[in-house]
Image (spheres, grey):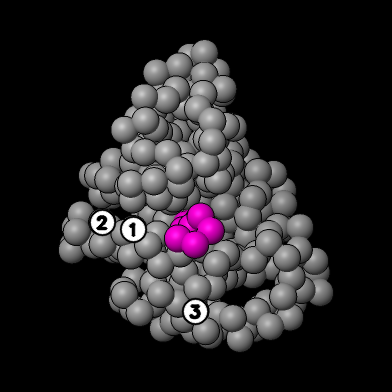
Amino acid sequence: MSSLKVEFIPPFIAHRGAPKLAPENSLESFIVARDSGAKWIETDVKLTSDGIPILIHDETLDRTTNGQGLVSQTSWKTIQTLDAGSWFSPAFSNTRVTSLTEMLTFCSSSRMRLILELKPSPGRTQATVMVTLIEASKMWPENLAPPMIASFDVDSLVISAQLRPDWPRGLFFEKWENDWVEMAVITQATTITFKEDLLTPDRLEILRRSPVPILAYTVDDPARAKELMKNGIKAVFSDDVPALFKGRILS
């Protein structure tokens, strides 16, 4: 595991921005999250067909744009023309897909902490890691704490540790793995994040002994967030950070 340390104050991570209030992974969504008081923002990074890192969760364009087909087979020139907001609300019809460059500029100028979740398309793991880290390393100010590189994909984190050992890494789990400690060591993880519904009382007791912070996703219910934090979870990813602040969890 990594000896790097990170702190989550307040302990809420804006998952894809504020996707209950604005289109996920859009600049508009990130602005809402920032203005609600979030200090950490998480987003998803994939490569276009011509190798441009953009912020999108799915393998295809279909759900969150008016385009169709695989992201990995579509050029940035084409993706720039797509409507990425009308699916959410007509009020966001002018929303466009956000590039990694735009996100890095936004977060550094807003002094936001950033988690870049690598979501490589099949066969593009090394390219996704390298392009993302090269772009982020080039643009991120040296006087700010660096982004965290996160993924469910172990290979992505292993490559990240080789390229930027000085940047924190987050290992995600969507199902319970009994060898989670071993996987955290392999990836040199700085944090470990589990899907919220995996965190039963017995497992929370086990996780208390973790030498690195344990996080949970995705938690929108203030009562559940409070319960998890009382049981050792250091921060939660949320689609509705404003609701967590209104829930007065920290009071």
Mark 1 and mark 3: Cα distance apart in space = 17 Å
Residue 9's label in the rendered image is none
Does residue 161 sit above or below 59 in this rendering?
below
Give x and y (percent) for residue 152.
57, 64
Which secondary structure, mark 1? helix
Which secondary structure, mark 2? helix
Give x and y (percent) for residue 142.
18, 63
**Residue plotted at (74% across, 70% down):** 176
Does residue 36 sit above or below 193 in this rendering?
above
Depth check: 55 or 231 in front? Answer: 55
Name the image quarter holding residue 216: bottom right
Inspect this view and state whether residue 217 appears: yes
Q: Is residue 120 magenta?
A: yes
**Residue plotted at (65% across, 49% down):** 219
Q: Which residue is mark 3?
A: 187
Bounds of the magenta span?
117-124
Upstream in the sequence, badge 1 or badge 3?
1
Answer left or right for 141 relative to 112.
left
Name the image quarter holding residue 214: bottom right
Give x and y (percent) for residue 122.
53, 58
Name the image quarter holding residue 164: bottom left
From the image, give the main secondary structure of the stretch colored magenta: loop
Which is closer to the viewer, label 1 or label 3? 1
Mark 2 and mark 3: Cα distance apart in space = 21 Å
Depth check: 153 or 205 in front? Answer: 153
> In the rendered structure, which amino acid carries the disc numbered 3?
Thr
Which secondary structure, mark 3? helix
Residue 135's label in the rendered image is 2
Answer left or right for 244 relative to 204.
left
> In the rendered structure, which amino acid carries the disc numbered 2?
Glu
Q: Which residue is mark 1?
A: 132
